[in-house]
Amino acid sequence: MAIFFQTIVAGLLKGGLYALIGIGMTLIMGVMGIINLAHGQMMMLAMYITFILNQVGLDPYLSLFVAMPSLFIIGVLIQKYFLNPLIKVETILPQNMVLMTVGIGMAMTEIVRFVFKSDYKYVKTSYSSSTFFLGGISFNVPLVIAFFIAVLFTIIMFWFLNRTDLGRSIRATAQDKDAATLMGVNTGRITVITMGLGAALVAAAGTLLAPVYYIFPDIGSPFTTKAFIITILGGLGSTVGAIFGGVTLGMAESLGATYLGMQYEDIVGLVIFIMVLLFLPGGFKRLTKV
Amino acid sequence: MLKKLPIAEMIALAVFMAIPFFMKDNYFLHLLILFLMWVVIGSSWNIFAGYTGQVSFGHAAFFGAGAYAAGLLAHHFGYSAWWGMALGGPAAVLIGLPFGIICFPLRGAYFTLASLALNLILMHVATIAENFTGGMQGIMIMPAFVSKIPYYYIALAMVVAILAVINLVVRSKFGYYFVSIREDQDAAESLGINSTLYKNISLGISVFFTGMAGSLYMNYMGFIDPSVVFSLSDYSIMAILVAIVGGVGTVYGPTVGAFIMVAVNEFFRSGFFGLLGFIGKRTGSPLVSKALDFVTHAHVLVFGILVIVVILYLPKGVVGDWEKIKRKVLRVRPTE
Amino acid sequence: MSFFRVEKLVKTFGGLTAVNEVSFEVKEGEIFGLIGPNGAGKTTLFNMISGVYVPTSGKVIYKDQEIQGVKPYRICKMGVGRTFQVVKPLGRMSVRDNVIAASFARVNSMKEARDNASEILDFCGLTSVRGTLAKSLPIAGRKRLEIARAMATRPDLLLLDETAAGLNPTELLSAINLIHKIRKNGTTIIIIEHIMHVIMSISDRIHAINFGQTIAEGTPKDVAANQAVIEAYLGTDYA
């Protein structure tokens, strides 16, 4: 039983971070109508930024203040110069924007590989491997901190989307782009800001994960996979759904790793993904409103 | 039936048939075999995506299935991998059709993601099922031929087969139905087109040839492992690149694309066809050898950048945008 | 035996009832008009007849066969053709290729399909633009292409969904002529139309619905004089 609770706790902690990754993705999905297949690679960039700053002695949690704005800018540039121009390009393939994000992700990974080589890097902190015990269950300190920061960001995002003009414009654009345009929302600007925000959120996740993960160029693509799984699980464009999706994936991975074996960790998510696509189209969002 | 003989095609075929009689250089033949293999894969992807509008981000799943079918047969049962070659296509269909039947209710981006997930699942399965697939160690078999020429002709035969199939398909009911589904699935249904059936037919053709290319790869290279044949960037994305660089939804687009992509790949992998290595040796400059190191590992970066550039500036590919390219070139000329 | 009828058709979306117990019968060879204000449920009815939606309850009976819930492509093969209110041209195919694709519903060889297509293009007056890509046609041409494509599947019953909307007076006149020609050809037509003088002049009988329910049925004259219909269109204040 102890193992079970340990697994649940580990899954929940991971799920908090996954939710952060998923919210960024789901915002992008809602507003642009595309899956961003460079999402994990953006996270990877943030991890490397954290790594560099750590080399000069900055605490990973402080580097949030550098990594998030940096990725915000990168997201803005990508949307402005690579994705928005595609709206005017006529093509046979409807998925050309998604393909574009694949290309961008590949380029990011390879550029990082040139600079840092494929070696594993890690962010050294005094607390990287420290744990505390609560009721016989061990808690990894950086993961717990990360979880609470993730929850904090999620709450801020909620407040932002529901209470501010900009947030409302984003939600309006996500619901109906044409209607939003007619209501005077500058949807072009909204897409740019949304991509920036999505990138900044996943950057936060990257920075928070940096103390507990090895950092290497290819770490992006598994997280891209996780991001789209979370988004589909939660229901596209749904922020609450992304939280549910993130926690579900975190739990499922933990349970899979504990009871099936470590090598099953990744495949569990994919199988759930296919199941949800087929049997619950629309994701968990569907369950809340009938 | 055919009013005009495909003269250009027949000349091209004759030239390709004749090449091994004049060119015995192994390196050159190797590149040609890769080129032919990519014509098969790119054209297969193009039938399904370019003509039928179903964008797959996971064609490596079928390439890998074909490769593993051939490899496993040889590895476990000691059959010559040539039997596997006959099995590669059907094995891919065996994976592809259930996938299609299950996932075709999904449209657009959802289907694309499902194909990506299939690719990843197969990669994990091949890794996990160590006892059966050899896991990360992969499968190694003895190549049947030392010479490259037999492989060359087999690859050429596959290319002839798939191009013939595509030419027949696009001039028939099937071609019209595929394109109708691509253009508007609801309209197609209202015109009596069973879209699920025809998507499955298109998928079947597509994965059959992709699987065959996979089994050729197994036989030719003699070694596979999950990270090689199920690779997203090296096969799934490369297949898309071959098609879009050449021209999506055109018969010979992927052929042109395959030529360009293999050339670009080799150009970088070989350090600008050995030029950098040559300069490096002559000058002994450490800078050049660093550049050489950079360039020889740059092909994935180049592919990424190519994806971006092609989507932005040549969305219909070299074949589809040929008029545009000609215009651009012609407009430059008078000012010179 | 009856040629075509619907019995107590109901369609609900979540809590909303779009069509509520609508029944009518169409005789072979007639032009049957379907009218009602925006959102009355006309297109939903068409979508149930053509198989796009499965009715919540009720029957669609065509040539003594129940066809509710049958897939759209099968219904087309049975001889029910349709056009879409929001036109759905196969954009990057030529006008001719659009019609050839539709012709394969009846024939299998390329040659027969080509012959059928050129006959239909001629019939619908699209021969002069047959090489044009469907997406570059003006709206009148696209509406006409919708009809041509449906006709190429050789339907016995044709569902026309607002084929006259957005046309100028000249185009309107030729559209009306085309519909008459189709009827003369022996095809039964159910037509949804907003332009009153069009539907009043071409229909043999008219069925009016509002909020998903039948409010009147009869000859154009009767329906035009019907109190409920006038109320539905003009509001109770004017009635």
Image (tube, rainbow, N blue to C red):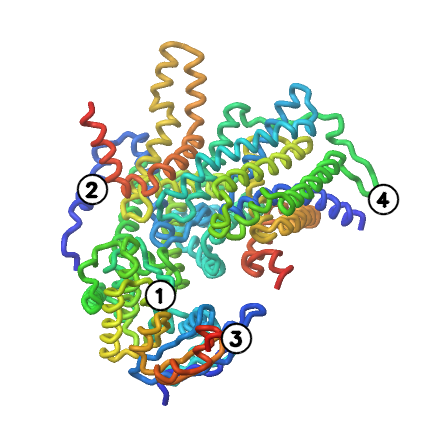
For the residues bearing labels 3 and 4, Cβ distance under 8 angstroms:
no
The residue mark sitting in front, 1 or 4, is 1
Q: Which residue is mark 2?
A: B12
Looking at the rendered structure, the secondary structure element under dot 4 is loop
Subunit that carries the residue with mark 2: B
Q: Amino acid at mark 1?
A: Ile
Q: Specify the quadrant of the image occupied by residue A46.
A: top right
Q: Which residue is nearer to you in this view: B216 or A76?
A: A76
Residue positioned most to the left: B4
Q: Mark on residue B193?
A: 1
Seen from the viewer's position, the closer of residues A259 and A229 is A229
Q: How many marks?
A: 4
Residue at (34% x, 65% y) in the render:
C165
Q: Nearer the viewer, mark 2 or mark 3?
A: 3
Instruction: Determine which residue is flagged by label 4.
Output: A135
Image location of residue A93, percent across then percent down: 38, 48
From what the image shows, is residue A206 above or below residue B135? above
Alpha carbon separation for disc pair 3 and 4? 55 Å
Please name the residue that numbered disc 3 is placed on: C56
Residue type, mark 2 in image: Ala
Quadrant hosting residue C112: bottom left
Q: Position of residue B221 (x, y in %)?
A: 41, 38
